[in-house]
Image: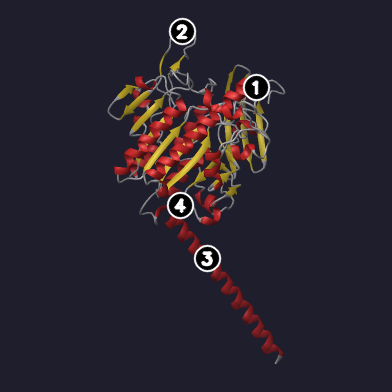
Amino acid sequence: MSIVYFRLAILVAVLSAVYICLELLLKAQEESTYIDTAINGNRRSPPHVVFILVDDLGYNDVGYNAKLHGSAIRTPNIDKLASHGVILDNYYVHNVCTPTRAQLLTGRYPIRYGLQHHVIGASHPSCLPSDEVTLADELQDVGYSTHAVGKWHLGFYKEDCLPTNRGFETFFGMYSSTMDHYTYLIHDFPNQNITGLDLHNDTVQSFDPAWDGSGHYSTELLTREAQKVIKRHTTIEKPLFLYLSYMAIHDPIQVPERYKEPYKDIIANEQRLTLAGMINSLDEGVGNLTETLKESGLYDNTIIIFSTDNGGSVQYSGNNWPFRGSKNTLYEGGVRGVGFIHSPLLPDPIKGTTSHAWIHVTDWFPTILSGLAGRDTMTKAIDGIDVWKAIISNSTSPRKELLHSIDPISWPKLTGTAALQMGDWKLLLGNICLLRDGQY
């Protein structure tokens, strides 16, 4: 009799284990189906994607981080989006502008096409090579309407380099790296007394200077142009990809006086006060853009991705605390990015969470193209990894290593640099810091 009971007990244990496994499998399948349906209706209705890229935003210069690390900066509109989305707390970008933008739009490390060395200047006969396939190219192939507003900074020395020849239907903004936030005049021609307007309103058919933009503050102007794109899209039966690349908070440090008001009794340093005003203007712009998405009826089917292009510039009062380093360095302060995803399409359990998944700017290419738009194959081999499932399931990233940079070329104060990260280990080579000891 005892043998019978023993065998019966084993049978019950086995059946219980099988039941639990089946239950877990069904739950996972339901969750996967729910997530896929919530995001894109099982591939039948891809979401709109609005990618907001901010220039030189420090880790501690966004409100939800500043509150934790003793900074006076407040960004209520940005914080609201982040707090109802997923904050990416282990997110990496390059340490300067051009390589980050190139990686975002190609999904490939810049050493593969020669853009790993610092940035493209206005006088440089260089651009993202024409044989590189951009995210906009790929999204157009799967039916997206693609538009770019803001700072391009991937070269413009010939027409093939311009945004509307790289997959975007329209472009409003600046081709180069830095200019006055009101006049849009650039002065980046070494040893030459040359200047010029760098503000453009381009389509596939024409390249036109935007003369009437001069005199309008860049953050406000770019926000209004992005709002126009959204409003026009209400009559278009295609998913929208809007790439909004603000020139803020890049130098020169300029802002209308009214944006400084909340900080005048808090921040004594004039440069830091002006930078705080620039962030305040940026936050207002993000809030206005979100309201336009809602008013236009696009918001409910939109994924908003927010990212910085590199760490804050300590030289211009940026704050990357608690990380060491600044823009232009390969320390964490130069490459650890501010980032989050916001959308009403996100599964309810992950709204308001923080993801610690390891994510790099190259990952947006396959994540948007495959994870959101449903494109399962890429035209070229890429370095980015689709991390969408890791984000929406709050799980670990499939990424195991990350090449931050390899740049053997020497330039003032630097003698060639490189950084490679594997897990918790990061290898730094060369003179990787432009700053004086203690400046960061």
Q: CA distance from mark 3 to mark 1?
A: 55 Å
3 relative to 99 in the view: left or right: right
389 relative to 73 in the view: left or right: left
Image quadrant where residue 295 sits? top left
Q: Quadrant of the N terminus?
A: bottom right
Residue picked out by circle 4: 345
Q: Nearer the viewer, residue 409 or 404?
A: 404
Considering only order in the chain, which callout, 2 or 1, is on the residue closer to the N terminus? 2
> Mark 1, residues whose alpha carbon is within 10 Å: few (<14), some, or many (≥20)?
few
Residue 208, position in %: x, y? 32, 22
Considering only order in the chain, which callout, 1 or 3, is on the residue closer to the N terminus? 3
Residue picked out by circle 3: 27
Mark 4: secondary structure: loop
Residue 221 at least partly seen: yes
At 47% from the left edge and 57% from the top edge, which residue is drawn? Answer: 35
Considering only order in the chain, which callout, 1 or 4, is on the residue closer to the N terminus? 1
Q: CA distance from mark 4 to mark 1?
A: 42 Å
At 61% from the left edge and 73% from the top edge, which residue is drawn? Answer: 17
> Mark 2, residues whose alpha carbon is within 10 Å: few (<14), some, or many (≥20)?
few
